Amino acid sequence: MTLHAVIASRLSDGVVVFQGEGGWVTQLSHAVVTDDEQAAKSLLDRALADAVMAVVVEPYLIEIQKSDDSARPYWPVLKREAIRAFGPSSHPEFIKSG
């Protein structure tokens, strides 16, 4: 089972955001997650509409997996998205909280 979420950058401040139920959220744990390919495509289509309206920039689907960490129930499969979601990997002081 492949899980997907939509990631983008918020145009107003460049913050990495995820598509949530009622809009864009800053935490992957609050993102809409689906294992259905058609639902994932619908999420992306909705995100692309927000990009046209200049709310977000470059939305795309990411593959995620479930995590044993209750604070971070999902984790991106690719390291690039993990860094975007949770912050730099160089020093704990710079990791996003939440």
Image (tube, grey):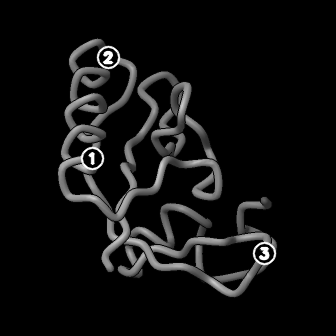
Q: Secondary structure at mark 1?
A: helix
Above or below, comparing residue 93 to residue 97 in the picture: below
Mark 1 = which residue? 39
* Mark 2 or mark 1: whose residue is earlier in sequence: 1
Q: Nearer the viewer, residue 54 or 72?
A: 72
In the picture of the structure, the residue carrying the numbered disc 3 is 70
Q: Residue at x 32, y 80 (%)?
A: 1
The residue at 52%/27% (across/down) is 23
Mark 3 or 2, nearer chain start: 2
Up-down: is 94 above or below 42? Answer: below
For label 3, the crowd category at 10 Å Cα-Cα, with few meaning under 14, some 14 to 19 and many 20 or more, is few
> In the displayed structure, does residue 66 sit left or right of residue 71?
left
Residue at 38% from the left image edge and 73% from the top image edge: 80
Q: Amino acid at mark 2?
A: Ala
Q: Toward the viewer: 83 or 26?
A: 26
Q: CA distance from mark 2 to mark 1?
A: 23 Å
CB of mark 3 within 8 Å of CB of mark 2?
A: no
Amino acid type at circle 3 is Ser
Q: Position of residue 48 (x, y in %)?
A: 22, 30
- Residue at the disc numbered 2: 54
Q: Nearer the viewer, mark 3 or mark 2?
A: 3
Quarter of the image holding residue 57? Answer: top left
For residue 79, side relative to residue 74 (left or right): left
